Amino acid sequence: MSQNSCSLAFVEQSGVLQVVRSRTLQLHLGPGRPETRGVGWQEVRDGRPEVLRLRQLRDCDKCGDGERFDNAARFSDRERCYFVEMCGSFGDRSNAGDNNNDSGFSLWPPLLASKHFSYGQQALIFGPYGPHWRNMRKMCTSELLCSQKISSFKSIRKEELDLLIESVKQQAAASGDHHVVNLSGKVKSFTVDVICRMLFRRKYVDEIDEIGFQSLLREVLIWVGTPNIADYIPQIAFLDPNGLIKHMKAISKVLDEFFEKIIEERLQSKDENRIKDFVDVMLGFMESEQSEYRIQRHHVKAIMLDMLAAAIDPVAATTEWALSQLLRHPRVMKKLQKELESVVGLDRIVEESDMDNLEYLELVVKETMRLHPVAPLLAPHESMEDCTVNGFHIPNKSLILVNVFTIGRDPSAWNDPDEFYPERFVGSSIDFRGRDFQLLPFGSGRRACAGIQMGFLEVRLLVAQLVHCFDWELPDGMLPNELDMTEGFSQVIFRANPLQAIPTKYRLII
Ligand code: HEM
């Protein structure tokens, strides 16, 4: 019998697991849907129950495939895992009694991938909570992802949106009324190009770049998401048991050379008049003695990689799901188009300044993020101190997985939870910024998404432009309710198959 199953047997026989289960069931039953809510919090003293639990969840919820959850389960060598399915149990910042666990859950478990792709956990994502992380987080939120900086890149977003709309128009014109557009691909290209221009002012396209930039990024995300035996058993990491470390080292070397080239070019050219991109801003801090941000060259590179990893897929996936839901719900699509007609008209394109007046658009995006949180278990968190949640003791160094997918479909929190119905938010104060625990697409607390403002803006812009400029139809006479909504696997939950649709009419009169 392996050591793991031995300890499991001991735990089962000694009744510890049972006690924990029944105590959990009696006292802490989560409000999750019946088929998944066996426990609100589950304590696991061995890896296997956790893996089982995640598999059950996958089977019941269909919110991703096995690999996704195997990834989460790879930390199962840890002594304990807590699986959060309860609204109101995670990161409550109200300081109300024992629900204030934000500081307790601010760590991310150290993975080997984070060592190789984060310059030894020197960046924001993967960075251990502490003074350096706080300094990096402050720099990112106050200097790079703040409102002022984001709006300084307005012209970039406009240029890229114009290019997107023009390319759809041209494709449609070239092949008549029935040209099928790969909306997923278009949206993804937009997000890549925008973040590249914000970061280092250039677009990197596979065909023209010898490194194959997008492929490289894809590789990083794949390796970060691939279960690594060395994460289970750190003692054998030096043997590189499934060869991942060798691959990660090779990719991080190529990336490092790429980032070095960008930094060198930048240090050589001193054009003071241009709008400062993220690299300019960070190099400015690096060179300044007075800067409050203690940052060195490897931090600049680590943040570049963070931004590329964090800004592309979540925006692309959320937009893809929003457009899919609109195609499945012609009533909602028409209502959104009506709003765009009345707020913007048909004689000009949507501008960023219109966003605040497009209330229904906001509801559509909120409802999309409720049903399709692109990180359904968020990132794995780790407790950094003993704490108590709803009377349940969580020891230090426990893995915390928050099932925002189930929370977003919890029937005790939402009427008709599986329905796509944006109107449910009319007159409701529920927001997605981490204070309302029914809706946590960006996480909550100190480790919540640092790019909420930019992400929310980009998703609304993309959806608004595509729906304002064109009428859409599904290919091959497919009916709206026949559109496949199966989720695929990646670090972020995209559609399993790209979203394809036909732009049947250009609606604007310009
Ligand atoms: C709709 C778009 C987006 C969604 C749904 C989203 C969602 C998330 C989620 C769920 C997390 C993990 C939170 C946790 O585990 O508690 C996260 C982290 C993060 N996101 Fe986003 N994100 C989006 C867009 C962006 C954008 C555009 C950026 C900008 C670069 C960004 C930057 C980050 C960063 C830096 C972190 C790590 C924060 C930390 O560890 O302190 N995100 N995001």
Image (cartoon, helix red, strand yellow):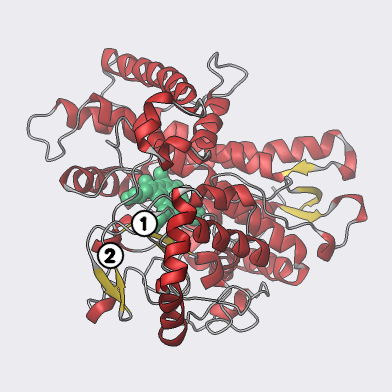
Looking at the image, residue 11 lies above or below residue 94: above
The quadrant where residue 291 appears? top left
Looking at the image, residue 438 lies above or below residue 464: below
Query: Going by the picture, which residue comes out furthest to the right?
Result: 477
Label 2's element? loop
* Res. 289 visible in picture: yes
Residues marked 2 and 1 touching at CB (< 8 Å): yes
* Image disc number at residue 401: none
Is residue 202 or residue 80 the one in the foreground?
80
Query: Going by the picture, which residue comes out furthest to the bottom?
Result: 26
Mark 2, Cα crowd under 10 Å, few <14 / some 14-19 / many 20+, is some
Looking at the image, residue 237 lies above or below residue 340: above
Q: Which amino acid does label 2 sit on?
A: Pro
Asked whether, in this view, residue 299 is left or right of residue 202, the answer is left
Q: Which residue is drawn at 55% across and 70% down?
A: 406
Q: In the rendering, at what x and y percent does residue 305 appear?
A: 40, 33
Q: Which of marks 2 and 1 is nearer the N terminus?
A: 1
The quadrant where residue 19 appears? bottom left
- Total marks drawn? 2
Q: In the rendering, at what x and y percent does residue 289 appear?
A: 8, 29
- Residue with the mark numbered 1: 79
Label 1's element? loop
* Image disc number at residue 395: 2
Q: In the rendering, at what x and y percent does residue 206 appear?
A: 59, 22
Q: Which amino acid does label 1 sit on?
A: Glu
Q: Residue at x 37, y 15 (%)?
A: 261
Q: Residue at x 55, y 63 (%)?
A: 53
Query: Going by the picture, which residue comes out furthest to the front?
Result: 1
